[in-house]
Image (tube, grey):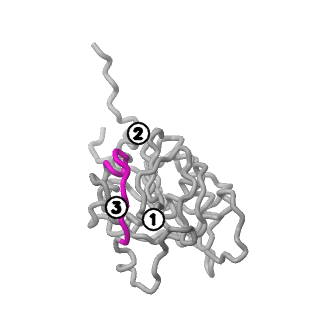
Amino acid sequence: MSDAPIRPLVGIIASHLTNEHARHLTSHGNVAAVRDCTGGAPVVLPALGDEFGAEGWLDHLDGVILTGGASNVEPHRYGQEVDPGDASERDPMRDGTAMHLSQGALRRGIPLLGICRGIQEMNVAFGGSLHTYLHEVPGRMDHRRDRSKVREVAMAPRHRLTLTAGSLLARIAGAEAVEVNSLHAQGIDRLADVLVVDGVAEDGTIEAVSAPSAPGFVLGVQWHCEWQAAETPLHARIYAAFDAAIQAHARRRLGLEAPVRAAE
């Protein structure tokens, strides 16, 4: 048997852009975070919509990352009508792919990490809903990115997050509260039944979730944890926990788990 280290395969969802030249795209930061902070091999998955499904990919993957993105999840996915005056960007091809990936990963126990748009996709895929215009909800802050600021400033920590005691994220962070960045327009409204709240912003917005009853690792965060992942302690801890999960899954998938010895 080879002693070469296992390289778990981590699928990273791409967005489907349809301006002059249609293309499937993810930021280098999402790929680099897997490369630098895990022992996994990143694989970018094209957004092929509802019809394609995801089972063929999931047969070979040891982890799935639903990344952030400029577009918003289509309202019909969570039972709301489209506002005729809403000019926000949409990505129906990505929506379909994200739904299949989320549901399949949850069912199969494949480690799942949702980031920004990804936490919203997870919640919708599992039966929850979103605030289409979070900044219009009474008492909520405007979580959207300030486009007048350079990226390094916009991605800096912006608000405090209180963590649920004993939750997956609290254990990962080793803290009761953390400071996170904020660059999102939508946000969780009705939480999916399978998910629990791991962290809440100062204005009551749910910004971290997990699924304790799921057969595998499931974590969704509303901020961009891929940003300076290796240099930011909280982000590095999140990827370290994800790495432990994908390594364990790869060993099971490849049949390398040691057999359980019967009690003598």
Verify CB contact (< 8 Å) between mark 1 and mark 2: no
Q: In the rendered structure, which amino acid carries the disc numbered 1?
A: Asp
Q: Which mark is residue 254?
A: 2
User: Looking at the picture, how far across and down is residue 101, in whole percent?
Assistant: 55, 52
User: Looking at the picture, how far across and down is residue 96, in whole percent?
Assistant: 63, 58
Q: Quadrant of residue 29?
A: bottom left
How far, Cα to Cα, is label 1 from label 2? 45 Å
Q: How many labels, in total?
A: 3
Rendered residue at 36%/42% (across/down):
248
Mark 3 lies on a secondary structure that is helix
Q: Which mark is residue 203?
A: 1
Rendered residue at 47%/47% (across/down):
196
User: Which range is magenta?
Assistant: 158-171
Work out whether mark 1 precedes mark 2 in sequence or the reverse, and give the earlier one.
1
Which residue in the protein does label 3 denote?
35
How far, Cα to Cα, is label 3 from label 1? 34 Å
Q: Quadrant of residue 159?
A: bottom left
- Horizontally, is 28 left or right of 101 in the view? left
Rendered residue at 41%/55% (across/down):
199
Q: In what quadrant of the picture does the C terminus appear?
A: top left
Verify CB contact (< 8 Å) between mark 3 and mark 2: no
Rendered residue at 36%/54% (across/down):
163
Q: Nearer the viewer, mark 1 or mark 2?
A: 1
User: Looking at the picture, how far across and down is residue 26, in whole percent?
Assistant: 48, 69
- Horizontally, is 250 left or right of 240 in the view? right
Mark 2 lies on a secondary structure that is loop
For disc 2, the neighbor class at 10 Å (few under 14, some 14 to 19, many from 20) is few
